[in-house]
Image (cartoon, rainbow, N blue to C red):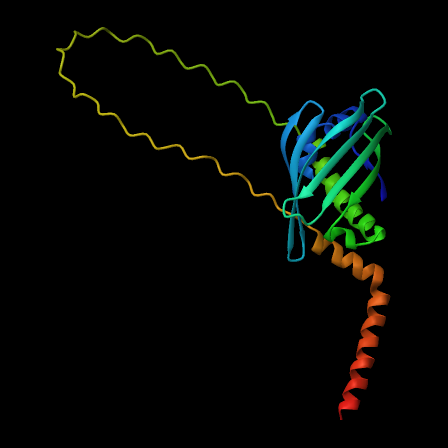
């Protein structure tokens, strides 16, 4: 299925291009994504997805098929497979950036998406709405990184005052000093890795399904209620 998106970023086209082609920054703004390696135009990583009680973890790789810095256009192909065999996902993403002034850029993104397994049970309309919501979170994160103020430079430390030389005192008799004992050093502990929160599709999909199909759901509930009453009367 093909998904289309268009949004604006409050930054110059050059700054936006740099951010979009920085895979570590992009992965850091995408819920559930962890980038494990980047080598040239190729990359690998994982995406954690939660669908109700079902937890999916797609492991895969991708690469830049095209990267045109002059035309601000790139094409990325990525493929992944759930580690428990619950489905696959593949996408070809084409993005074009257009300058709207010195501090504004419009991004047009077309995604050719192919999915199998549990997430594929939702129709194209639901997946489009879900991707819109996820993209909104992504753009907000990207904007915060692009518009964050630069860290202030540290002022140089003041030069230490030079003490005036004191009058020379007669040399003291040497005294025996105790041999210093080595102080045991604590064993360094490995730094704790931040936990990556999974992309909760259940919480994202449910409100969209209710909004889109509330009439059908209400009609189905009404039919079940009528059947329940008919069966109850027959039992009497």
What number of labels is visible?
A: 0
Give the quadrant of residue 31: top right
Q: Is residue 114 left or right of residue 187?
A: right
Residue 229: give x, y in percent of width and height. 79, 84
Residue 185: give x, y in percent of width and height. 32, 30
The single residue placed furthest to the front in the displayed view is 85
Q: Is residue 128 left or right of residue 45?
A: right
**Considering the image in quadrants, where does the N terminus appear?**
top right
Depth check: 28 or 226 in front?
Answer: 226
Depth check: 220 or 8 in front?
Answer: 220
The answer to whether residue 105 shows anywhere in this view is no
Depth check: 34 or 147 in front?
Answer: 34
- Residue displayed at 70% across by 34% down: 26
The answer to whether residue 209 shows anywhere in this view is yes
**Considering the image in quadrants, where does the C terminus appear?**
bottom right
Give the quadrant of residue 219: bottom right
Q: Is residue 142 above or below residue 99?
A: below
- Residue displayed at 40% across by 14% down: 161
Q: Is residue 121 above or below residue 114?
A: below
Residue 136: give x, y in percent of width and height. 77, 44
Residue 23: give x, y in percent of width and height. 69, 30
- Residue displayed at 15% across by 10% down: 172
Depth check: 87 or 32 in front?
Answer: 87
């Amino acid at each position: 299925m093909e998904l289309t998106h268009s949004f604006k970023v409050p930054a110059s086209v050059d700054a936006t291009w740099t951010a979009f082609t920085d895979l570590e920054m992009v992965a850091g703004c995408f819920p559930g994504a962890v980038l494990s390696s980047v080598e040239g135009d190729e990359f690998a990583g994982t995406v954690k997805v939660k669908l109700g009680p079902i937890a999916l973890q797609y492991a895969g790789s991708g690469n830049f098929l095209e990267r045109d810095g002059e035309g601000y256009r790139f094409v990325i192909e990525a493929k992944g497979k759930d580690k428990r065999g619950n489905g696959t996902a593949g996408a070809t993403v084409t993005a074009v950036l257009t300058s709207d002034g010195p501090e504004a850029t419009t991004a047009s993104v077309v995604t050719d998406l192919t999915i199998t397994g549990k997430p594929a049970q939702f129709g194209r309309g639901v997946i489009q709405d879900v991707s819109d919501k996820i993209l909104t979170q992504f753009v907000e994160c990207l904007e915060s990184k692009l518009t964050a103020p630069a860290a202030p430079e540290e002022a140089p430390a003041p030069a230490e005052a030079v003490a005036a030389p004191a009058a020379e005192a007669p040399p003291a008799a040497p005294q025996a000093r105790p041999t210093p004992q080595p102080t045991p050093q604590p064993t360094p502990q490995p730094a704790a890795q931040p936990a990556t929160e999974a992309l909760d599709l259940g919480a994202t999909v449910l409100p969209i399904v209710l909004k889109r199909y509330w009439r059908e759901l209400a009609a189905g509930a009404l039919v079940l209620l009528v059947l329940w009453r008919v069966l109850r009367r027959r039992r009497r």
